[in-house]
Amino acid sequence: MIYDEPRYRIAGDRFIEVELGNELTFDLNVIVHNLAAAVEQAGIAGLIELIPELASFQVSYDPDRIGYDDIVREIEGVRHSLTGSGASERESRLFHVPLFYFDPWTAECVEEYRAKVRDKVLDPDYLCEINGLADRRELMRVHSGTEYWVAALGFWPGLCSLMPLDPRSRLIAPKYNPPRMWTPKGTIGLGGGLTSIYPDRTPGGYQIFARTPMPIWDREGRLPAFKDSLALFRAGDRVRFVPIDREEYDHVERKVADGTYQHPCVEYQTFSVARYRQWRDSILEDGR
């Protein structure tokens, strides 16, 4: 549900959580980012930082310069000044991410979890089972058959939450219980209805089934893609997964290691929210 009115939550002595709904959908996420961008551009005195999330955004502010009631009033003023659902077109970079499906590293990680923590169906097979897919080849076709919307960044530097834009490629999965103690860097995971790329070796709970050699954050900023930011993606970018084999994986990994890798990115496109909704709704109406 998208709320008629935002819900403001105190999140500490200098933080506010602005909740705009309780669903994880593209439409709500666009509302979040439109309002967050407008608030950021409003130049509110005392506002320090704004962090967009999936269904909400967090505001940090200087309580010596502005109080809680006043910053809420300022945000409400910005919200009421917006018309419709916000910008219908936006800049949106498209990244082509090479992906080695059913790779040996995530398989090793899952096997260690099964041996030391809890036995479970192998992640790719479990995803096929709960999504009604015939086999792993169909899983790969469905997962790589759409562009993904970068809905939010967080939890770990550079980690992205990706929503499939084609409703025919929607996949679901529950998280691990308990979570893994480690996950290989570059792992692709699915949790709820979101895909994510693990930017580093971290604990995790998503079902895992692929790996990319392409870094999505770089604390040292060695590669050209990280000259302006240590994190590769921005909210509103898009991702397209490109299946590769082990030979191509090793080739990309070598280029990353020697500093010559160029991230495949289309930077000259705009994304039409209105036209996308029309296309999506036509697919849903046809039941294809």
Image: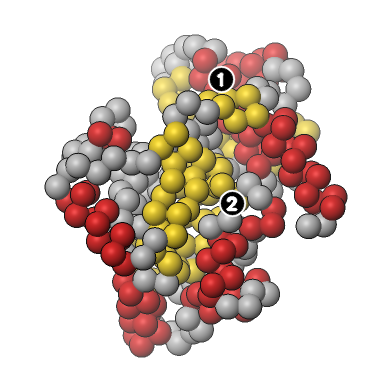
**Residue 52 image point, x, y percent:** 52, 35
**Label 2 belongs to which residue?**
146
Q: Label 2, secondary structure: give it.
A: loop
Q: Residue 244, position in %: x, y?
A: 39, 61
Identity of the residue furthest to the right in this view: 285
Q: Name the residue under label 1.
A: 39
Q: Position of residue 222 (x, y in %)?
A: 19, 38
Point out the image quarter for the N terminus: top right
Q: Which of the 4 image quadrants contains residue 60?
A: top left
Alpha-carbon distance for marks 2 and 1? Answer: 31 Å
Against 276, is 204 above or below? below
Question: Which of the pair 152/178 is nearer the observer?
Answer: 152
Question: The C terminus lies in which quarter of the figure?
Answer: bottom right
* Residue type beneath disc 1: Val
User: How many other residues sit within 10 Å of disc 1, few (<14), some (14-19) or many (≥20)?
Assistant: many
Mark 1, secondary structure of its residue: helix
